Image (spheres, rainbow, N blue to C red):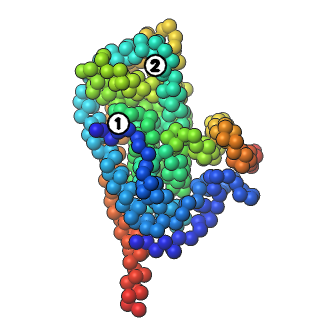
Amino acid sequence: MHMLTTPYQSLHTDDAAAVEAVYALGHWLLGQDRHEDAATVFRLMMRTAPTDERGWLALGTCHEKRGQPLIALELYGGGAVAAEPSALCHLARFRTLWDLDRIDEADEALDAAREIATQNDDEEFLARIDMERSVRP
Amino acid sequence: MIAVGNYSPVSTVGAATGQGPSGAIASDLSLLPPPQEMPADPLMALFALQSKSQLLDVQSGIKDVQTNRKLREKAWKDMKAALAKARRARKKGGRWKTVAKLCSKLGKYGSVVAAIAIAVGTGGVGTPFALAIAGAALSSASLLQSETQFLQRMGMDDATAAKFELGLGVGGAVCTGGAGMAASASAAQQASDAAAATDKMDKLVRTTQTVQRAATATAGAATAAGGIASFQASQYDADATDHETDALRQRIEDQRLQRMFSEILEQIEEAQESEQRTMASLRGAIDTRDTTPLTIARRV
């Protein structure tokens, strides 16, 4: 069967543990400024666990650190859909769009993040969203 | 195995968590959640996931699309017929709303990712896996060159990019091209039994609507997407038939888009090979980090 038509199946427990381990590895590589190595690890994570928002976020971060905000933006956008609902991906989009001076789109992204946080009654995250916006006049 | 004790707090990466703020949070902190646990054996985990990933490899998908590219002319005709059926099906009820909602998000948030997903995915467009493959392809291909070079190779010159906002503009152009090809491929595959197989029709419609939604997102930026965008806008309108036909007739900047699509395929293939090399190198690096202290210890 073509892989793209293969029904998505939840990761087994072992796989989930492997995802955690690989995420930790990529996180560590990113912390060592080994962005390309980290990106390789996060790509692997993303392909095997596409509904995990951390893979999208982390890979986007790698590209931002390489000075590729537009690529990062696409990845955050992909994560917002694949890992839906992902307030973090929307928040990441907000930051990147704001830095690109695409203010209207940035505000839309923030609204999307706020909506998810509101639905989840996540007051901490809502506070964070407000803070993110307030520090950007 | 890597010595797990080598892990240290990553102040710039893990200072803020996605679970919510803890104390004062500066806006420049990373959004990345910290790892839940330190892996006992990250190399084994790497192997495990790589093995899984290989099972999901995109290579077969690429070959399928390349083969289908040769059927393009025939596929356009098939797609036209399929779209007409899709239109009739859509009139029967609101079952497309969920699909349309997803497609809208694809177009809005992930222009290039969605486009490549369409390009590589002859089926299952919009699934997390298809998106992930597209995102990974985008990521690895763009790492091989500068962002600007990459986007230009996707068909956008400097002036156009500046005018149209790179992300969406490129997304629209790529999407339109990829859409044509992917939808064609889908139609070609389904040509023999499209009339009878409802599920296949669903896929085709889903693909088509993804294209339309993505095109809508770029309507202001990419004139090439105008025909399809207007089709989307009027999908529930009495004039839908005319717009659908128009959309199909507009084989927008066909040669350029075809080149662009080929470029995407080449880059994905390149990226796959590069990623395999990098992964091997990374495994070596991890292994070295682990064995070196052991070797030294044994000498002592």
User: What residue is drawn where x is 46% and y is 12%?
Assistant: B92
Of the two numbered discs 2 and 1 in the rendering, the one whose residue sits closer to the viewer: 1
Label 2 to label 1: alpha-carbon separation: 29 Å
Q: Position of residue B82 (x, y in %)?
A: 34, 17
Quadrant, the C terminus of chain B: bottom left
Q: Which disc, if any, is residue A42?
A: none
Can residue B199 be seen here? The reply is: yes
Quadrant, the N terminus of chain B: bottom left
User: What residue is drawn where x is 59% and y is 56%?
Assistant: B33
Quickly name the residue at label 1: A5
**Is B39 displayed left or right of B67 in the figure?**
right
Element carrying mark 2 = helix
Q: Is residue B75 above or below residue A94?
A: above
**Is B207 displayed left or right of B21 in the figure?**
left
User: What residue is drawn where x is 49% and y is 15%?
Assistant: B93
* Callout 2 amino acid: Gly
Can residue A110 be seen here? The reply is: no
User: What residue is drawn where x is 69% and y is 45%?
Assistant: A122
Q: Which disc, if any, is residue B227?
A: 2
Asked whether B76 or B290 is in front, the reply is B290
User: Mark 1, chain letter?
Assistant: A
- Please rate how many residues cluster around mark 2, counting C-alpha atoms within 10 Å: few if below 14, some from 14 to 19, many from 20: many
Asked whether B197 or A125 is in front, the reply is B197
Q: Quadrant of residue B138?
A: top left
Q: Is residue B16 above or below residue A5?
A: below
* Callout 1 amino acid: Thr
- Please rate how many residues cluster around mark 1, counting C-alpha atoms within 10 Å: few if below 14, some from 14 to 19, many from 20: some
Q: Position of residue A90 (x, y in %)?
A: 60, 42
Q: Position of residue B228 (x, y in %)?
A: 45, 21
